[in-house]
Amino acid sequence: MSFKLEILWTDALIYLLLVVVALLVRHVRRHEHLMAPWRKVARSASGMAAATVLAFFVVIGLADSVHYRPAVEVRDGKTIYAVEVLSVFDKLTTKLRTQKAKTYSAPLATHRYAKETIELPDGLQVRDYPRLTYGGAHLADPATEWGPDIARRCLYGIAGGALIWLVVATLLCVVLARWDPADTGRMWRALRRGETEIPWRAILLTLAVVLAVGGPLVALAANYHVFGTDKVGQDVFYQALKSVRTGLVIGTLTTLVMLPFALALGVMAGYFKGWVDDVIQYLYTTLSSIPGVLLIAAAVLMMQVWIETHPELFDTVLARADLRLLFLCVILGITSWTGLARLLRGEALKLREMEYIQAAHAFAVPHFRILTRHILPNVMHIVLIAIVMDFSGLVLAEAVLSYVGVGVDPSTISFGTMINSARLEMAREPIVWWSLTAAFTFMLLLVLSANLFADAVRDAFDPRIRVGRSFRLAAQKA
Amino acid sequence: MIAYITRRLLYAIPILVGVNVLTFALFFVVNSPDDMARVHLGVKRVTPEAIQKWKEERGYDKPLLYNGAAAGGGRFIDTIFYEKSVRLFAFDFGRSDQGRDIGYDISTRMWPSLAIAVPVFLMGLAAYLTFALLMAFFRATYVDFWGVVACVAMMSISGLFYIIGGQYLVGKLLSIVPISGYDGGADAFRFLALPVIIGVVSGIGANTRWYRTIFLEEINKDYVRTARAKGLSEPRVLFRHVLQNAMIPILTGVVAVIPLLFMGSLIAESFFGIPGLGSYTIDAINSQDFAVVRAMVFLGSVLYIIGLICTDISYTLVDPRVRFE
């Protein structure tokens, strides 16, 4: 089947981010003094366990960031492509995406959540819970078969997960034994006792937990709605997985967008002092004096007006939603660069008095070169800590902003839109709890692992630095 | 001291001018008033007459910066910039796009906001400081370790979860207090209990951890060793010496927040149906009432700047090393 690649704005920026990260990794690997703190991160058990979970999220997010439009038909030698833009992740989860129920259904249910009038084959009408079109449709008699079927699938899932885990663990053992002059058996014992330098045991344990939970989920998802369905019958599990990309995009692209400004302005203010410092300080004091949420709200409102009055610029719904997501990242970036800039200014103020900078002055090194070669590398640890610390705050902020009505486009699946559309259902009887639970659980997993990883990074790079969350919604929220 | 405060106040003026120009640019230059009118009246099927009428009713039909048609000072006064932005400096907020007096709305809605924000602030501060001190007291033990773990877990939970979960548990399952609503007088307590508790609980994670780092930093200083060396008990060291000195960094964070308490909290107020400034803002955002959002942006930054000034003054009051200069 032919298809046409469709690169959305956020996709492009994500690829850019990947390239930047790859270049940085190459650079860091070549310099031992840059590697040292990363080795320390790699030695932290909680940090590496968190990184393992994050890796799963990143894989989902990346698979969801390669978009294409499948070909519908070929007419007169010209291929016509579908209007709908799909991602590789959508393709992998076609079943989840397309097998929709009509409306609400509970997790793993075979019947709908509310009673409805059903017409029997003999013309009689009864009020009962109708069967779902896809959820558990393979069961002839759900009343007796449902329990054993679920149990069997769970077992299959766990068995599959265990198999994958064993393969990974064995491979790891063999590879490690190669590097280290040890035989595989001794390596295995060292792994089991947690005596390796990098906490492989913690990583493998995390992997085991993820696989033990993920295996059954995947096995069940083929024939059931694992987390139920929402109001329009869409699978909640699919929504939760799709939300991961939105969360990752907001958490990372915001930083990518604001970083050049924060770096350039913060370092310049501290290095040049004088009127440059005054202007830049004035700029960020003004920006930060507007309460974050209000500035975001004002900017997003204006953006909405702009998008509504310029509909001709977007050819697909997704392109429009995507641009709005990018705008949101930019706006969040504008409101959150001030904290980092302030920190960088302080550090640059300290650095400019150092002997090696004075030596550079004595050798008549131009300012630009001093900034890029001598100051910038020495503030990078602050930048890195700020990036990882901000990530979780931004993911949480997205949910709050979507609730306020200034978040992502309503057609974008995100934790915020999931919570927002599900919260009113708490008043129903019996209560529709699965959408909220799924959204909060996935969000907690993502944010918690991000927080743990961020702590490991901070401890390794500079345990004393007091980087506050430069994006403080907490004060607004409480 | 008075000279110092005056200088700080004067320094605030250019910042407020900056905020004002920024909001003006955001609200009137990025999109023309015509665009706003179109969004309000529905993008399609809107006549130029309807747009003109909408603009006239709200005073958006004037030129942006310079009115060539008017005479004398009117050239600058009879403009959108003067009417909508400059007058904010006199706290003349004008009318909302729905036609209500914003200044009056703010003055009445301020009190419910304060009724929830002040107890959350005070009780929260007491609770977070207590937990943080406890963890500092038991530092490097299992109490401390699991305390930090609990903090990280709690700060990873979305604030929305605390509210929704709390409403469900306390309001619906246990039916102790009403789920939402507000009433003046003594009855207010019933409605405020839940939002206040949730407000305090949702801040435990981040704040306790934050204060703990401050305490731990202080505990490793020389004067603490001196205090121990002269035989003071650990609680006395903590409460008498560490707490007092740690108050300096804590104060900076705390004083800056106090003026912002007036603004209330967006999320909690709208979830609990409390008619404060937070829910006022949310309603304005949802109904795209630009005038109200503009007024709240200005008010918010005024309060923030007051907070900054108070912080600096409080610094000089508690820390004798800081001088007015």
Image (cartoon, coloured by chain):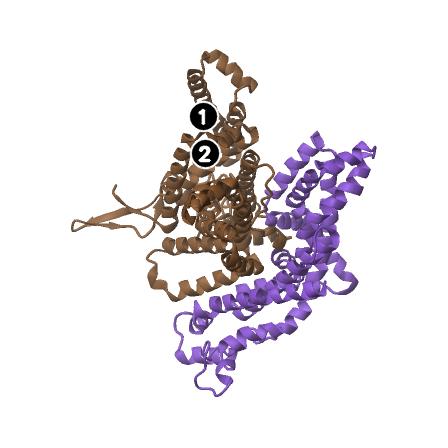
Chain colours: A brown, B purple
Q: Mark 2 lies on which chain?
A: A
Q: Residue B311: horizontal and vertical position, in percent?
A: 68, 56
Residue flagged by tag 2: what amino acid is it? Val
Work out which residue is located at the far front of the displayed protein and give it.
Answer: A362
Mark 1 residue type: Gly
Residue A477 x %, y %: 62, 53
Q: Is residue A23 left or right of residue B315?
A: left
Nearer the observer, A264 or A138: A264
Helix, strand or loop at disc 2?
A: helix
Would residue A291 be visible to someone looking at this image? yes
Identify the secondary structure beneath mark 1: helix
Q: Residue B79 location, x and y as percent?
A: 49, 79
Q: Is residue A175 positioned above or below B243 on the image?
A: above
Query: Whole-Å distance between the Cαs marked 2 and 1?
Result: 10 Å
Please give the residue where the numbered disc 1 appears in the rendered image. Answer: A160
Query: Pointer 1 indicates a residue of which chain?
Result: A
The residue closer to the viewer here, A273 or B92, is A273
Q: Residue at x 16, y 49 (%)?
A: A77
Q: Name the residue under label 2.
A: A218
* Residue at (44% x, 86% y) in the render: B69
